[in-house]
Image (cartoon, rainbow, N blue to C red):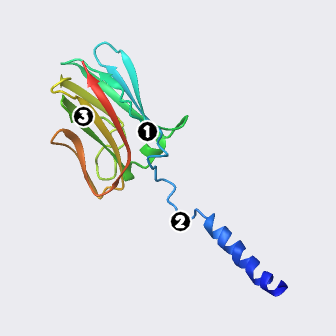
Amino acid sequence: MKSLLKYILPVVLFLFLQSCSRADENDDVFTQEEISAIELTVVDELSGASSTYTYIANSAFQPEILLQDGRSYLVSVAFRNGAEDITDEIIDERDEHFLIFGFTDTDITLTRLDDDLRTDGRRLGVKSRWLVNSAVNGGNPKLNLALIHDAAEVSEAQNGTAWGSVMGGETDALAIFGITD
């Protein structure tokens, strides 16, 4: 029996240590569970009034962004993991991330304003300007905001009702905001 334990104990210990190893994981991957909230700060360029709208991951509640036709807004996006703001980490890894602004039943022209460019010359999208042509242009105006990870190719151009498109990659986080006037 002692000779059997002599062989089993090292094997069990080896398997336990291997199962606890995270060395093969990529530390910069933010899964939907790690991004617990996405915040939009919307500043009316004319009045300077600022509002913050927070989408909680996997929530059925959709915050409603109040916009006025003909107005221009500066919008910044922040990502949270619990109380921790992880926006700077995503900006630092901008070559691996890209935001898609999918507007439906609304007419908004989006311009990305990020200070730092990705190596492909594109902007991530955490800072943008929204020109509201028509806040409500249908029965269910909303914004589907997607953070994409590791896309093979990205475009800032409008693609249908979305500003931005990708080839490949996966969605790290998705937030849905209602839009109202």
> Which of the 4 image quadrants contains residue 7?
bottom right
Q: Nearer the viewer, residue 50 or 65?
A: 65
Q: Nearer the viewer, mark 1 or mark 3?
A: 1
Residue 33 on image: x %, y %: 48, 46
**Real-space CA distance between mark 2 and mark 1, rounded to the nearest whole angstrom:** 26 Å
Q: Is residue 8 left or right of residue 158?
A: right
- Identify the amino acid type marked 1: Ala
Q: Which circle's residue, 2 or 1, is located before the other in the chain?
A: 2
Residue 99 numbered mark, or none: none
Q: Quadrant of the C terminus?
A: top left
The answer to whether 117 appears left or right of 164 in the picture is right
Residue 57, which numbered label?
A: 1
Relative height, residue 133 to residue 24 (above, below): above
x then y, percent, for residue 54 = 42, 29
- Vertical relation: 99 (above or below) 111: below
> Amino acid type of disc 2?
Asp
| In the image, farthest residue toward the top | 47
Identify which residue is drawn at 20% across, 29% down: 108
Residue named by callout 2: 24
Mark 2 vs mark 3, CA separation in Å = 38 Å
Q: For residue 14, which quarter of the picture?
A: bottom right
The numbered mark at residue 111 is 3
Under circle 2, the secondary element is loop
162 is higher (above) or lower (below) than 10: above
Number of numbered discs visible in the structure rendering: 3
